[in-house]
Amino acid sequence: MNEKKYKRFAIIISIVLPIAVALLFSVKIEGFDFGFLPSVYATINGITALVLLSAYIAIKKEKRILHKNLINVAVSLSVGFLVLYVIYHATSDSTVYGGTGYIANLYYFILISHILLSVIITPFVCFTYLRGYLGDYEGHKKLTRITFPLWMYVAVTGVIVYFMISPYYI
């Protein structure tokens, strides 16, 4: 594939993925109990944050191969998270947060920002990864200044959301 095809592929993923996930929320598959999955994908989010931090440290120490390998792990973890997230939500009813007052406001702020940024981060990850893969290190570095903090926020807030809602799982 040439660079143009990679870019086209990244654009397609950036558009199709959020739409597909949104559409899958209307699908309900009965007869399966995947109630254990939220703790699994919250753990994956936490590991992703640690891997991203390790990748950041690796590149600061100019360990490019280690950085590349860690980013590949982070992308793989994120894909794994997404698959498990979709499976859970396709087979389970949504859990309602039961907190009140300022804690509920904080929860919904974190949840909404997490969801919005998880959609926004997809093209950033795709194009940042693509630039690194294609050897456009200056372009990669520029995009990483946006991608890294957004991706870290999504990974960390995924864990926070889980801990805040976990007492309300049935």
Image (cartoon, grey):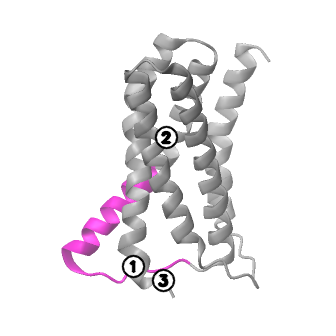
Label 1 with label 2: CB-CB less than 8 Å:
no
In x, y percent, where is residue 112? 39, 59
- At a point 60% along the width and 63% down the height, the residue shown is 85
Q: Tell which tag, 3 or 1, sits nearer the viewer.
A: 3
Which of the two residues, 75 or 145, is positioned nearer the viewer here? 75
Tell me what residue is drawn at x 65 percent, y 31 percent. Answer: 11
Q: Main secondary structure of the magenta part?
A: helix
* Viewer-proximal residue among 86 and 120: 86
Query: Could you tell me which secondary element the residue under label 2 belongs to?
Result: helix
Residue 3, above or below 118: above
Name the residue at the left extreme: 102
Residue that carries the numbered disc 1 in the rendered image: 97
* Direction bottom: furthest residue: 170
Residue 121 is labelled as: 2
- State which tag comes first along the sequence, 3 or 1: 1
Question: Mark 1 or 2 closer to N-term?
Answer: 1
Within 10 Å of disc 1 (Cα), the crowding (few <14, some 14-19, many 20+) is some
Residue 90 at what x, y percent from top left?
Answer: 68, 71
Alpha-carbon span between mark 3 and mark 2: 27 Å
**Which x, y percent locates residue 3?**
70, 14
Of residue 51 and residue 90, the one placed in the foreground of this image is: 51
Look at label 3 and name its amino acid: Tyr
Crowd band around label 3 with a 10 angstrom C-alpha radius: few (<14), some (14–19), many (20+): some
Mark closest to the chain's N terminus, 3 or 2: 2
Q: Which residues are magenta?
A: 94-117
- Which residue is under mark 3? 169
Q: On the rendered image, what quadrant is the N terminus found in?
A: top right
